[in-house]
């Protein structure tokens, strides 16, 4: 009944969307899990990264230079934010963090509007990336294949970093017992600053990758932030593995919901009612999923504290 | 002797009456203009504000010899904020006339405030079916259109061009559903699918585009205003749908085209849209408006701007018609109803619901002689078209 | 009873609010009436949030949903030509309380960040439902043809009457909050915030207590919604959007969480700053954002906390009460 070619294509789209969510979720879950810091401004770093990359790309005519400048620049901004403001909020409750980082969102949105104007920036892609590749009669956009590749590379990198290296050990230790590693003589401040910088760079990378699909616009961060929060909550806060699984799950469910829910509803509803109900239900789907996951596993799928 | 007496008497009458006539003439005209200045949608508000500026330049900042002040307020795309700003303009700045309004929900929230204050509201964009129909009011006028008219015109175009099947993609909010319903009303071919997407947060259209391609429809109809336009057009190119013609309403316009050109999305060239106006519309007023706008701001104005320019010019025509006595509501209303001013679209008339009865055109995206992307009129689709909600408005046409 | 600065500030604010209609009439700027009325309505919403967030430790990121439900109840009633306020308002309270029962029962299973997220999720679902409700205007919203009709009691189409009704209800809600917080029930809620296990161990069914508080807060927000519908003559899904819930949280934090009148101060400052700053520059959020950050960094316990601390003039070394 469902066209298998379309189904496969939609699965591909879902994975690609999930990967993009993962790039954002990875940084957010690290910061959240390790510093116990609710950083709503993660989306602002994503936006700033996208704008810097777009500007540099337009100026130099090279997408690659755009990426390579945007990442360190956003990392630097992230470190600056951490040292000047966020560092003083680690010992506060989540609410103070919410208020302060919300203030940052307002600030960054207006700053970007002041500098770049309200209209947003477009990033021209090299022609080779701006077309689609036909695989078994399924046209797959080249750029989206690239996004998936980059996302998988980053996932592998983070896995090795967290599981195999000494830094990763400190990060994991920090997530499960902050006081302990401080007591062991590790300069926890430096670790935190580094982790925050890493999170900012990951956000920027997500912004850079999203730019050519969505364009860099004001408020692009808040749009996606809620979905990213859903991802890390489903995955279990602080867990990279959880973020990866959660992101793919949300990505695939979101896309499949948008693709097939109306046909599904038409099986038992009149056409008109189905056409009204399907988009509403598709919008709610990820929230329903989150409520269900939390109902059965209140700590998410992969609670970080337990491993 | 007798003659001298009458002369003297009339001179006396004149000296008594004259101060009253002067008193009735306002010293200053204040217009409140609600639009969106902050956030991403601020690009629309900027265009509207620029166009109001051009209108004021053309008028020498005076209407019928009286100085004019336009006060802009930002609604942040939030109905509640828009309403509060309207209250502020009415009850603090004490404006004489309200204008502006991009969004249906903002104008619906603010409508009652203006009506209760007994002022005129000249809507420069929002074309909600409610104000064209059931909630029409003797003091509310529009210089734009009713939402459904533009997609209905597109439906006719599709019929004429022999498009047999169509796939519709639009955002799931009131205007989005209006647009889809509009094209469905006039399009005679088969509709192979319709997707309503989450608004305004969804900027990924991969699922919908894949479905549209799988449906093998002759054409795709979209409505994506603001920043969603660019995201959609990019993904349309990337998804390999370039061979399926794209028909859009309120999406590909003077605001989005510079950005689409910046992104080098060649597939946008040659796509079709419908509208009551285009930068190249051949009327003397429009030529002056567009060229002065381009001189001052370096880009093409959009239809949002054209409508805002017209709002100011319409107000000017009424102020002059009543000789500056703007407190005379009945006379002002009668003047508004005549629409006796130089509109960018040329002469039009008001229907019973105070919405324009006007022409609609098919436009194509082309390069202008400097290589800038713009829209050019291809043909007239509707002549003197009235919206379908006029019959739901209880006002009777007496002019 | 010690007269502290909070009480003085509170009394001053209410005196000022009581005089707003007179000031508006004297200065011939009726807009002040409208502005102050909206502030007070949002203050009621913020008060109700403070009840669960400040005292119960339940950080709801979806509290605006109850304002929306209250407003929609009035709007939908009016749409079906039930204009009597004697029906509309009790219904608004009951329906928002009913939703609060369901939402509370689901979300109170979780804690901390998970509670934040699940309240957010539930509210967003209602938002999308509102956007899809074509019958009631969807995203365009629903204009109210006439205000709630309290025939024989008060005429809400008269601006000053509505103003004083809101004023009275704000005082009433503050009084309820004060009674609740200082009751055995309130103590149990606050106890559950600091140590839930202990409260359970000494025999308090904390879940039921917290749920009750959640429902009362929901009903109070529903009242604010009914008022807001009458204030704007309009209801719209935007009232339920997560950013509006965020605004409420900010109002509570700005004024001072866990102090009784903090939310009122917060709502006042929030709306006044928004109005004043946006009058100066269209880039007003460039100032407002850093202002919020400064409040967090330097005014622990919000603006009221800042006032108290300024008086005590002692260095605050206590670092954790978050």
Image (cartoon, coloured by chain):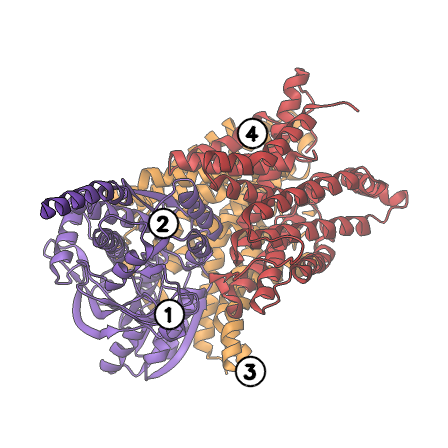
Chain colours: A orange, B purple, C red
| Chain for numbered disc 1 | B
Residue at mark 4 to residue at mark 3: CA–CA distance: 55 Å
Alpha-carbon distance for marks 1 and 3?
A: 44 Å
Can residue A152 be seen by looking at this rendering?
no
Which of A25/B148 is in front? B148
**Residues packed near mark 2 inside 10 Å, few (<14), some (14 to 19) or many (20 plus):** many
Closer to the observer: label 4 or label 3? 4
Above or below, C70 against B46 in this view is below
Q: Do labels 1 and 3 share a chain?
A: no
Per the model, the C-alpha gap separating discs 4 and 2 is 31 Å
Question: Badge 3, how many Cα within 10 Å: few under 14, some, many 20+?
Answer: few
Kindly identify which chain the residue marked by label 3 belongs to.
A
Which residue corresponds to the image point at 49% horizontal and 48% vertical from the top-left?
A24
Q: Which chain carries label 2?
A: B
* Residue depth check, mark 1 versus mark 3: number of the one nearer the observer: 1
Residue picked out by circle 1: B395
Q: Position of residue A297 (x, y in %)?
A: 70, 56
Residue placed under numbered mark 3 in the picture = A267
Position in image of residue B193 (x %, y %): 41, 77
Q: What element carries label 3?
A: loop
In space, the residues marked 2 and 3 are separated at their CA atoms by 44 Å
* Disc 1 versus disc 2: nearer the observer: 1
Q: Answer with mark 1 or mark 2, whichever residue precedes in sequence.
A: 2
Q: In this view, does B235 lie to the left or right of A271?
A: left
Q: Are marks 4 and 2 on the same chain?
A: no
Which residue, given by chain and number where applicable, does mark 4 sit on? C295
Q: x, y (%) of residue B256? A: 28, 55
Residue C262: quadrant of the picture: top right
Viewer-side label of 1, 4: 1
Do labels 4 and 3 touch, CB within 8 Å?
Answer: no
Q: Which of marks 2 and 3 is in front?
A: 2
């Amino acid at each position: 009944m469902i066209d298998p070619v379309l189904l496969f294509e939609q699965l591909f789209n879902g994975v690609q969307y999930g990967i993009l969510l993962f790039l954002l979720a990875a940084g957010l879950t690290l910061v959240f899990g390790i510093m116990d810091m609710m950083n709503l401004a993660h989306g602002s770093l994503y936006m700033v990264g996208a704008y810097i990359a777009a500007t540099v790309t337009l100026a130099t005519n090279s997408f690659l230079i755009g990426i390579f400048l945007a990442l360190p620049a956003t990392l630097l901004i992230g470190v600056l934010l951490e040292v000047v403001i966020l560092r003083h909020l680690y010992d506060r409750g989540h609410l103070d963090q919410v208020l302060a980082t919300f203030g940052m969102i307002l600030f960054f949105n207006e700053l970007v509007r002041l500098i770049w104007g309200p209209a947003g920036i477009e990033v021209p892609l090299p022609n080779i990336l701006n077309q689609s590749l036909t695989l078994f009669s399924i046209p797959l956009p080249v750029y989206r294949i690239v996004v998936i590749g980059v996302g998988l590379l980053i996932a592998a990198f983070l896995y090795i970093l967290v599981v195999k290296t000494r830094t990763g050990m400190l990060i994991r230790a920090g997530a499960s017992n902050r006081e302990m590693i401080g007591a062991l003589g590790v300069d926890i401040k430096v670790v935190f600053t580094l982790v925050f910088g890493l999170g900012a760079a990951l956000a920027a990378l997500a912004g850079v990758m999203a730019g050519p699909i969505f364009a860099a616009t004001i408020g692009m961060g808040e749009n996606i932030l809620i979905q990213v929060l859903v991802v890390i909550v489903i995955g279990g806060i602080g867990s990279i593995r959880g973020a990866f699984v959660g992101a793919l799950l949300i990505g695939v469910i979101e896309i499949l919901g948008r693709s097939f829910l109306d046909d599904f509803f038409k099986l038992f509803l009149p056409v008109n009612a189905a056409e009204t109900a399907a988009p509403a239900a598709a919008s709610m789907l990820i929230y329903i999923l989150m409520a269900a996951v939390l109902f059965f596993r209140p700590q998410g799928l992969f609670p970080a504290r337990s491993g | 002797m007798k003659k001298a007496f009458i002369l003297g008497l009339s001179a006396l009458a004149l000296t008594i009456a004259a101060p009253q006539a002067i008193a009735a003439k306002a010293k200053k005209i204040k217009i409140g203009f609600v639009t969106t200045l902050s956030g991403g949608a601020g690009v629309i508000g900027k265009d509207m504000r620029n166009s109001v500026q051009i209108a004021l330049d053309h008028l020498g900042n005076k209407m019928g010899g009286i100085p004019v002040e336009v006060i802009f307020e930002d609604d942040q795309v939030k109905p509640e904020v828009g309403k509060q700003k309207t209250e502020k303009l009415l009850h603090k700045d004490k404006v004489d006339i309200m204008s502006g309004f991009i969004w249906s929900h903002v104008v619906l929230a603010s409508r009652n405030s203006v009506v209760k204050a007994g002022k005129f509201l000249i809507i420069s964009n929002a074309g909600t079916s409610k104000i064209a129909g059931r909630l029409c009011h003797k003091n509310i006028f529009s210089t734009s259109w009713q939402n459904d008219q533009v997609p209905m015109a597109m439906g006719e175009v599709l019929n004429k061009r022999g498009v047999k099947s169509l796939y519709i993609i639009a955002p799931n909010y009131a205007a989005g559903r209006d647009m889809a319903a509009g094209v469905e009303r006039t399009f005679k071919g088969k509709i192979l699918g319709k997707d309503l997407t989450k608004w305004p947060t969804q900027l990924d259209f991969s699922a919908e585009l894949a479905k549209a391609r799988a449906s093998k429809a002759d054409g795709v109809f979209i409505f994506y205003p603001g920043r969603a336009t660019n995201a959609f057009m990019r993904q349309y190119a990337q998804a390999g749908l370039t061979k399926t013609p794209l028909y859009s309403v309120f999406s590909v316009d003077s605001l989005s085209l510079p950005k689409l050109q910046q992104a080098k999305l060649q597939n946008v060239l040659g796509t079709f849209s419908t509208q009551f106006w285009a930068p190249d519309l051949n009327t003397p007023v429009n030529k002056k408006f567009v060229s002065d706008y381009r001189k001052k701001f370096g880009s093409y104005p959009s239809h949002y701007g054209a409508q805002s320019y017209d709002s100011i010019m319409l107000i000017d025509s009424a102020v002059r018609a009543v000789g500056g006595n703007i407190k005379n509501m009945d006379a002002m209303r009668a003047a508004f109803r005549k629409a006796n001013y130089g509109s960018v679209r040329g002469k039009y008339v008001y229907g019973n619901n105070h919405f324009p009865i006007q022409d609609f055109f098919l436009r194509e995206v082309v390069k202008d002689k400097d290589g800038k992307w713009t829209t050019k009129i291809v043909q007239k689709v509707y002549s003197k078209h009235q919206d379908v909600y006029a019959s739901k408005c209880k006002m009777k046409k007496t002019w | 009873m010690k007269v502290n600065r909070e009480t003085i500030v509170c009394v001053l604010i209410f005196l000022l609010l009581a005089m707003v209609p007179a000031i508006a009439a004297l200065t011939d700027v009726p807009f002040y009436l409208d502005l102050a009325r909206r502030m007070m309505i949002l203050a009621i919403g913020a008060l109700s949030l403070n009840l669960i967030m400040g005292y119960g430790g339940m950080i709801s990121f979806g509290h605006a949903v109850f304002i929306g439900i209250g407003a929609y109840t009035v709007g939908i009633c009016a749409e079906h030509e039930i204009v009597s306020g004697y029906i509309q308002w009790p219904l608004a309270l009951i329906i928002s309380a009913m939703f609060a029962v369901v939402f509370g029962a689901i979300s109170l299973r979780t804690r901390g960040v998970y509670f934040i997220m699940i309240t957010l999720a539930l509210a967003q679902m209602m938002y999308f439902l509102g956007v899809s409700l074509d019958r009631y205007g969807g995203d365009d919203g629903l204009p109210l043809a006439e205000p709630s009709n309290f025939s024989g009691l008060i005429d809400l189409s008269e601006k000053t009457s509505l103003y004083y009704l809101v004023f009275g209800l704000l005082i009433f809600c503050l009084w309820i909050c004060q009674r609740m917080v200082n009751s055995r029930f309130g103590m149990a809620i606050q106890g559950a915030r600091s140590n839930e296990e202990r409260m359970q161990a000494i025999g308090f069914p904390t879940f039921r207590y917290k749920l009750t508080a959640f429902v009362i807060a929901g009903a109070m927000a529903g009242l604010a919604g009914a008022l807001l519908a009458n204030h704007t003559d309009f209801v719209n899904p935007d009232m339920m959007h997560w950013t509006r819930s965020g605004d409420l949280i900010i109002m509570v934090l700005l004024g001072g969480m866990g102090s009784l009148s903090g939310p009122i101060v917060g709502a006042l400052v929030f709306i006044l700053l928004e109005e004043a700053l946006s009058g100066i520059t269209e880039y007003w959020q460039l100032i407002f954002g850093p202002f919020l950050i400064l409040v967090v960094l330097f005014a622990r316990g919000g603006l009221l906390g800042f006032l108290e601390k300024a008086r005590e003039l002692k260095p605050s070394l206590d670092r954790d009460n978050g």
